[in-house]
Image: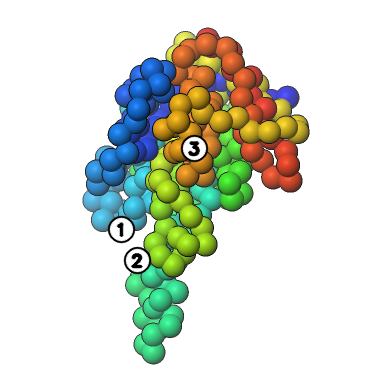
Amino acid sequence: MITCYLQSVGLAAPGLESWSTGRTLLLSGDPLHNDPETPYAPNLLPPNERRRATAAIRQAFRAAEDALRDHASDPSRLASVFASSDADLAVLNRICNALTQPERQISPTDFHNSVHNAASGYFSIAIRSMSTTTTVAAFDASFAAGLLEAATLANIEGCDVLFVAYDVIGPPPLLAVRPTTASGSCALLLTATRGPATLARLDLQTGAGSESVCSGAAAEKLRAGCPALRGLPLLEILAGSQAGECRLKMDAGRILHLIVQPA
C-alpha cells in the first residue's frame, strides 16, 4: 500500500469549470450543463508558447492552473506526472493528412507538438521547473496509472508532485475508432507527508474487482466518455470531505483501490 496526502484539486470539464464550482455540483447531484468549454489561454505560459499550445495542451493547463491557484509554495520545485490516453489526436490527424499529399509538408508547430509529452514540456517551461516530469499513457486506465505513478514518485523522491490527467475529443476519422464524447482534465497535488493545507489522506493499493461509477447520471456520462475523467468517483468523495473508498480501472482486469480519509 502507498500513502500520500492531497493538497489541492483542479478540474475542468463541461459543466464543471473548476474545482470550486465542480465540487458544489458533484456534492449536490444537480444536473450538469453540457455546454462546450470556452477557449482557454493558460496564464502560466509565456506568449510565444501560448500561441503554439494546442487544444489538448490548453485542456491540461485548465486543471493544472486550477490546482495551483491557491498553492502557496514555489511551483518551480514541483515534480509532475501527466497522463493522457490519446494526447493530441488533432495534431496526429493533421500530420497524417499532410503525409498523404505530394509535397508532404508538415507544419513545424505540429511536429513540435506531436510528442506525447508536449503538455508536460510546456508545463515545465511555464513554471521554470528542472524537477522530474513523467508522462503516462494506458488507454482507459491512464488516470489510474498516472495517479499510481504520482503517488509512488512522491514517496520515493519525497517531493511534491502535481498529477494532471487530460484528454480531448479527437477529429474524424479518428473519432470513429476512438470515440470520446467529452474533453476534460483533472489535477491533484500530492505530497508524501501531511501539511497544514492537507485536504485528505489517500491510501492506494492494486487488486482485483470492478471499477466505481459516479452517483450522478451526468457525472457518470462524463466519466464514461472521457478517459481523463475516470477519476470522477474519487472527486465525488473528495467533494464531500468525508471518508470513502473507490476503485479505478487499471490493465489486465486489475483495479486501483483508494481509501480516502479527510484531513
Of label 2 and label 1, which has the lower sequence position?
1
Q: Earlier in the sequence, mark 2 or mark 3?
A: 2
Structural distance between the alpha carbons of marks 2 and 1: 7 Å
Q: Are marks 2 and 1 in contact (CB under 8 Å)?
A: yes
Secondary element under disc 1, as helix, strand or loop, is helix
- Looking at the image, which residue sits at the far bottom? 102
Across and down, in percent, residue 229 comes to: 48, 38
Q: How many marks?
A: 3
Numbered tag placed on residue 80 in the rendering = none
Task: Please name whichever residue, 162 or 10, is drawn nearer the observer in this view of the structure.
Answer: 10
Residue, disc 3: 223
**Residue 232, percent across and down?**
49, 31
Q: Is residue 255 left or right of residue 217?
A: right
Calculate the distance from the C-alpha at mark 2 to the C-alpha at mark 3.
31 Å
How busy is the neighbourhood of tag 2: few (under 14 within 10 Å), some, or many (20 plus)?
Answer: few
Name the secondary structure under disc 2: helix
Residue at image point 25% right, 46% down: 39
Which residue was labeled with disc 2?
109
Question: N-terminal of the two: label 1 or label 3?
Answer: 1
Q: Position of residue 178 (x, y in %)?
A: 51, 58
